[in-house]
Amino acid sequence: MAKYQVFYKKYPTFLEDGKLTIDEMHKSHVFVKNVEASSLEDVFAVMQGENWSPNGEARDLILKKGLHHTSMSIGDVIGLNNQYWEVAFIGFTELPKYLCIHCETPVYPEALRRENICYYEDGYCLNCSQEIKLRRSNRIYL
Ligand SMILES: [Zn+2]
């Protein structure tokens, strides 16, 4: 078991953001609570309304935080040990820790390569074609 942090999107679109970074997360997301869980999937299950708020127990917390949804959904974020994942349509997408210093494009972990994002290849940024130099994105401190 580990202690995960749960962040909900203030204005949920129920879509993947795709460009969300650790730097920007505090603008769009609100910390909800910590959850003891064994995996990201487990956190997602625990945070479904029927599990953590079967009789509306979470309503006051959700209202006080200025949020609009109780059940964790696509676009919400889970944190653990300074790593953050966005809930995706299928599974979870890790938020980048690094940005290209030329074009500010987030750099995602190797395993999450997709079109239209920036990543290492032969030392060049695939978004802006400049020699890759990265800066660490800022951490969110609660
Ligand atoms: Zn770049």
Image: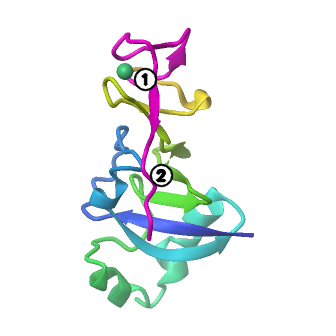
In the image, what residue type sits under mark 1?
A: Cys
Q: Which sits in the foreground, 102 or 128?
A: 102
The disc at residue 118 is 1
Highlighted magenta segment, given as a residue range: 116-142
Q: Secondary structure at mark 2?
A: strand
Residue 42 vertical placement versus 61 (above, below): above
> Is 136 colored magenta in this rendering?
yes
Q: Which residue sits at x=38%, y=12%?
A: 130
- Point out the frontmost of discs 2 and 1: 1
Colour pattern of the rendering: rainbow
Q: Which residue is mark 2?
A: 87
Image coordinates for residue 135, horizontal then vertical, percent: 44, 35
Instruction: Identify the main secondary structure in magenta.
Output: loop
- The vertical placement of 86 against 115, above or below, is below
Residue 105 sits above or below residue 37 on the image? above
Looking at the image, do the residues carrying marks 2 and 1 touch, with CB atoms under 8 Å apart? no
Callout 1: CB less than 8 Å from ligand 1: yes
The percent position of residue 55, horizontal first and vertical second, equals 45, 91
> Is-magenta flag for residue 118?
yes
Which residue corresponds to the image point at 42% horizontal and 50% vertical from the top-left? 138
Q: Kindly identify the residue that appears in the image at 40 percent across and 89 percent down.
A: 56
The spot of residue 97 in percent (x, y) is 50, 42
Identify which residue, 11 or 27, lies in the foreground.
Answer: 27
Label 2, label 1: how far apart the Cα atoms are: 20 Å
